[in-house]
Image: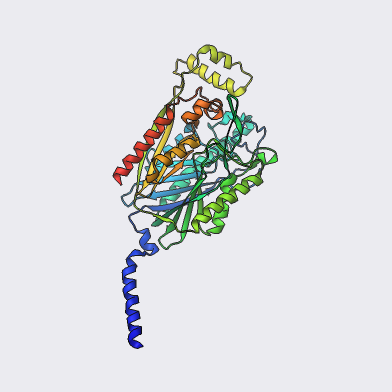
Amino acid sequence: MRSSMRCIRRRRAWLILCVAPFFRTPAAAADDAGPQVGIAVRDITPEPPIRLAGYAGRNRPADAVDHPLLVQALAFKNPTGERFVLAALDNCEVSRAFMQPVLKEFADRFQLGPGEVAVVSSHTHSAPVLDETLTDMAQPPPPDREAIARYSRSLKAALVEVVGAALADCRGAALEQGMGRACFAMNRRVYQGDRVVFGDNPDGPADWDVPVLRIRDAGGAVRAVLFGYACHGTSVRGGDDWYVVSGEYMAYARRHIESHEPGAVAVYLTGMGADCDPSPRGRLLDAKRHGLELAGAVMGVLGRPMQRVRGPFRFAYEELDLPLASPPGREQLEKDARSGDVHVRMRAERYLKMLDAGQPLPEAVKLPVAAVRFGDDLTFVLMAGEVVVDYSRRLKRLLAGDRVWPVGYAYEVPCYIPSARVIKEGGYESEDSLIYYGFYGPLRPAVELQVVSRVEALVAGLRARS
């Protein structure tokens, strides 16, 4: 009997020695030549009354807050010193003009170069209007513009502060990824004869993937949960809820996830789904319902085995010039300057001022794009603009081996980025929306091939360096 027990103990010891190399402690997993991670959060909730962005039809400021707004920063730092920061912002969007002084502060204070901080707007349509960012879409009177200017100054300061705090917080980390699914995004382009109008199109393209990245510290505690979805932040469509500040469904999802993972920070990264709306939509209750569904998809992923993300990150950034159709002549501009639509009139007046000053009219739209590749396990593709869902589906198909996570509304939003199909069909995303962004268009159909080709080249370059 004793001999038998000694034999069993020896076999157990042998098994432990053989198996131990395949199981790593959290501390060992964190020390895998991967990046350190720093996390910081700042509250950016406005004090009502303040005008909200995203809809031209609102006629007064918001007078209540249902959910706080945040800006969150995740700083990644390689062992060799390279840094990259994701800043997730509860707002509809930011423009290049709004971001220019902020980017200068990033460079001056933290020595961060072009593209090394990606501000990703959540695209909630229940956050404040910002300076030089679709401001004229809301047509705010002077007192409201003063409130917008004050809030914009405080937000710029918060962006600089949160990025600095995240950089100062960098420490060892272990990363894991997984994929969930949520089904409330629905394509909103409905075909009526030769026209494309807003509505629910259940047969149209959508991307229901919910990518998830879990970040643990060296002791194994969950520090952050990143998640994404390709859908507009437009659950709230009218009534009294239209005048309430909230982070929309994405913020409600964050709250549920953080209650499930105490001590962790939940961070939402907007996908490429600019031609998709939540369905159903109308009230704050719908936003909360979609937030619960999205959080459930994330928690389902967290409850299953996830795949390790190893190695340092590699980064590439570029700015493309997307060609527009030839601008109209003076006769058409003068006609538009007499339009009963104030937004059409303002666009024409801007072009006429450029003509009178001898300046060239816009013939292209500047589009920042970036790729961030973590070893061979995960590749973020970040693109500025309101990017339609065709890009998300195509990039995932073409770059399936690179485990692509598409992110839209990154860096800035110059306009919608339609696919060749959407440009051919026409409608809001390719034509009417350009009125609010101050361009005559549309973009030329070749932009889809131009964008996709450059993204493929950026990812291939990073793949060769891995």
**Residue 304 visible in the snapshot:** yes
Residue depicted at x 50% and y 35%: 388
Q: Nearer the viewer, residue 398 or 34?
A: 398
Q: Where residue 259 appears, x then y in whole percent?
A: 56, 57
Using the image as rendered, state which of residue 189 and residue 431 is in the foreground. Answer: 189
Q: Is residue 178 above or below residue 160?
A: below
Q: Is residue 93 above or below residue 364?
A: below
Q: Is residue 203 left or right of residue 359?
A: right
Q: Is residue 65 above or below residue 321?
A: below
The tally of labels here is: 0
Q: Is residue 318 above or below residue 444?
A: below
Rendered residue at 55%/18% (across/down): 349
Image location (x, y in percent) of residue 391: 46, 36
Give how far across and how far down residue 189 sits, in percent: 57, 32
Q: Is residue 402 left or right of residue 98?
A: left
- In the picture, the quarter occupied by the N terminus is bottom left
Residue 463, located in which quarter of the rendered image? top left
The residue drawn where x is 55% and y is 19% is 348
Outermost bottom residue: 1
Q: Looking at the image, which residue is at 36% across and 84% down? A: 5
Nearest to the observer: residue 381 or residue 219: 381
Q: By what rule are the colours in the image chosen?
A: rainbow
| Res. 105 in view | no
Q: Which quarter of the figure has residue 143? A: top right
Q: Residue furthest top?
A: 331
Name the residue furthest left. 464
